[in-house]
Image (cartoon, grey):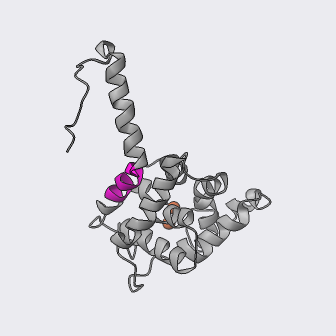
Amino acid sequence: MHAVTSARFRAAVDASREDWEIIENAERQWRRNAGVGEGLLRLLGSLQYDDALGAPVNLYTHCLQTATRALQDGADDELVVVALFHDVPEAISQNDHGALAAQLLAPRISAARTWLLTHHGVFQNYYFVNHPTRDRHERNGCLDHPYAEQTDYFCRCYDQNSFDPDFPVLPLDSFRPIVRRFFTAAGAA
Ligand SMILES: [Fe+2]
Ligand SMILES: [Fe+2]
């Protein structure tokens, strides 16, 4: 077993070249071992008992349900990962959660899925038919975009319908191999 080597500086200004190499090597190893994915799984897992804030299910169940639907629909690993983490930033920020989710997964995801995440809120509004304040036609300005159709498909088939407390969601652990596979491949690239 290798001893863990850590840089010994106490202020960044004192760090040596060797210190930075230790850190860079550790970060590279972490990426190779799908560390980003593990961190996101921990973050999502921490939401398990969060209040649903008036919704039929909380964010944790909503994310699992969205990802379960994507997986059962035959989505590729990237889209399952996108579905699994698409709303996680809603739990920790009042800012645009779609853009934040895209940032969390960048640069591991494609331009198409980055656009999907960034715009899914606008497309989701179309299905909030009776929402008192949201404009369901807000997406109209984006409908000609090449990624609009896949974004609507995500919202229509996976996201807007994933508030069902009776839907048999797959447990978080069942997504672990997919997350690991996706981030290992992305980290090695
Ligand atoms: Fe969302
Ligand atoms: Fe959602």
The reply to whether the magenta stretch includes residue 186 is no
The reply to whether the magenta stretch includes residue 36 is yes
Q: Residue at x 75, y 61 (%)?
A: 140
* Residue 171 seen in the current view: yes
Quarter in which the N terminus is drawn: top left
* Residue 100 seen in the current view: no
Q: Residue at x 60, y 61 (%)?
A: 120
Q: x, y percentage for residue 70?
A: 54, 74
Q: In front here: 160 or 29?
A: 29
Q: Residue furthest front?
A: 1
Q: In front here: 25 or 111?
A: 25
Q: Is residue 107 left or right of residue 52?
A: right
Q: Residue furthest top?
A: 14
Q: Main secondary structure of the magenta part?
A: helix
Q: x, y percentage for residue 110?
A: 62, 53
Q: Which residues are magenta?
A: 33-43
Q: Is residue 3 above or below residue 62?
A: above
Q: x, y percentage for residue 131?
A: 55, 69
Q: In front here: 139 or 14?
A: 14
Q: Is residue 8 above or below residue 100?
A: above
Q: x, y percentage for residue 98?
A: 54, 54
Number of numbered discs present? 0
Q: Is residue 53 above or below residue 40?
A: below
Q: Is residue 95 left or right of residue 52?
A: right
Q: Residue at x 57, y 53 (%)?
A: 109
